[in-house]
Amino acid sequence: MAIDRWRLAAFTAPAFPIAAAGLPLTVHLPPYYAGTLGLNLALVGLIFVAVRIIDLPFDLLFGQMLDRARWRWGRFRPWFVIGAVLMTAFTAFVFMARPGISPLGAFGGLLGLYIGMSLFLLTHLAWAATLTDVYHDRSRIFGWIQAATVLGLLVVLALPPLTARLLHTTAPAAGIHAMGVFLILTSALSTILVLATTPERAMPPPPSAPVHSDFARVLVNALMRRLLLADLLAGLATGVLAAMFIFVFEHRLRFDAATASALLLPYFLAGLVAAPLWMKLAYRIGKHRTAGVAGVLFCITATVIAFLPPGNVMVAIPVLALAGMPFTAFPFLMRAMLADVLDVERRDSGRDCTGLFSATLVMTTKIAHALPVGLVYPLLALIGFQAAPGAINSDAAIAGLVALFVALPLLLMAAAVWVVWRWPLDQAAHAAVVAELALSVDPVRS
């Protein structure tokens, strides 16, 4: 089913608030809860880590619900609305919290928000995987979703300084409240857009096999195992780079904190601009080869960043723009490739595992985002690196920082490229799978 650009824009709109919510949950809210709202610093850290850990199994639960539950209103629509309502309600609670909030209240609000976001995100991605069975159209759909994701990051990055300028205040609460209002409005509007413009395809019958056999399919499917490994490795490479980015720019390249943060703008902007270029390349050489090209570019630019001339903004900007180009490629290509894997699974097992397989990929991505700090920070401490702003580090500590910044992401991304480069499910192979499904009774396409 071909999708025109206006309907595609409407369908991809939820990626905007989902991405915009993720950044403040990691960057802005922890110091806000510990500072302005007055909660104990160590307790805040414990709450935010605990919520992220507890949230992980919910992805698998929601994936099972998407595959097994049947509603008269559709397979995805009811869960999509429930996720949107939960996300909107708990966004108001978390972002509009006042001083005096209890630790239990903060924990409950954050857990509710993460659960709502997980259901909203998973339903959106699973629904996207069923919109078409055309190999290249999937690159287009998930490329648009990734572009909306980056745009959401850019807008939410700009909200705190913009709010401070408009309201003539430096109070952190103003920026946090502005982000909350923005998330509530965009979540509600994007949900309405999707419901009004995107019909669902025919629902497959619910699986009759026991639940545990569904989980076994994730492990049995060789393509799925390879996809999850590639996504994990690429996510870890990006996460490790992000975990050390500020350290390298402050202590090795000698930029102040404000300049280092501002230099993320050309990085994200380039990722947004590059998204359609990666889509076009995927049309020419296939999704897996395009992911490999993006991975190689990531390795080259990550290495160049570490050896930029200290304090030179004019050199840093174009290099960071080039480094930001592969930022969007791997995530959307992995999701588009997952949609192809789901066709193979339907052919081989006769099951529709869209929800569970999508949930597993979402969970792998979350793990890749959560691990880098725990992996990198102990290594930095081991080499004697001092992370405090203005700290004096020895030449050996700086050299160790640069070595980790270059070697870890390069090795991880090179491994991801190796995993996807020999991916067997190219356009021709996928066309054969679709043809076989057309000859069988495939309820998803009937």
Image (cartoon, rainbow, N blue to C red):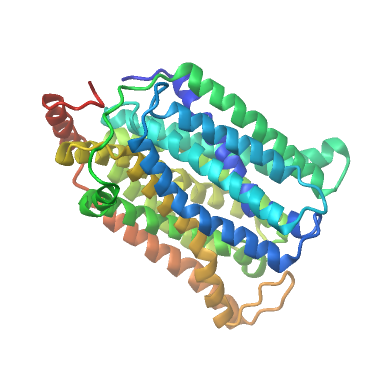
Dividing the picture into quarters, in which one does residue 332 lie? top left
Residue 386 placement (x, y as % from top left): 66, 77
- In the picture provided, is 209 more to the left or to the right than 355? left
Q: Looking at the image, is 419 positioned above or below residue 12?
A: below
- In the picture provided, is 303 more to the left or to the right than 343? right
Q: Looking at the image, is 379 positioned above or below residue 187?
A: below
Residue 426 in view here: no
Residue 78 in view here: yes
Q: Residue at x 25, y 53 (%)?
A: 216
The C terminus sits in image quarter: top left
Dividing the picture into quarters, in which one does residue 233 lie? bottom left
Residue 123 placement (x, y as % from top left): 44, 35
Q: Looking at the image, is 61 positioned above or below residue 146?
A: below
Q: Residue at x 36, y 29 (%)?
A: 70
- In the picture provided, is 49 more to the left or to the right than 434? right
The N terminus sits in image quarter: top left
Residue 213 placement (x, y as % from top left): 24, 49
Report the front residue among 335 and 39.
39
> Please, which residue is most extreme toward the right here?
168
Dividing the picture into quarters, in which one does residue 290 lie? top left
Q: Residue at x 25, y 41 (%)?
A: 341
Report the front residue among 336 and 319.
336
Report the front residue among 60 and 420.
60
Q: Residue at x 40, y 55 (%)?
A: 234
- In the picture provided, is 378 more to the left or to the right than 295? right
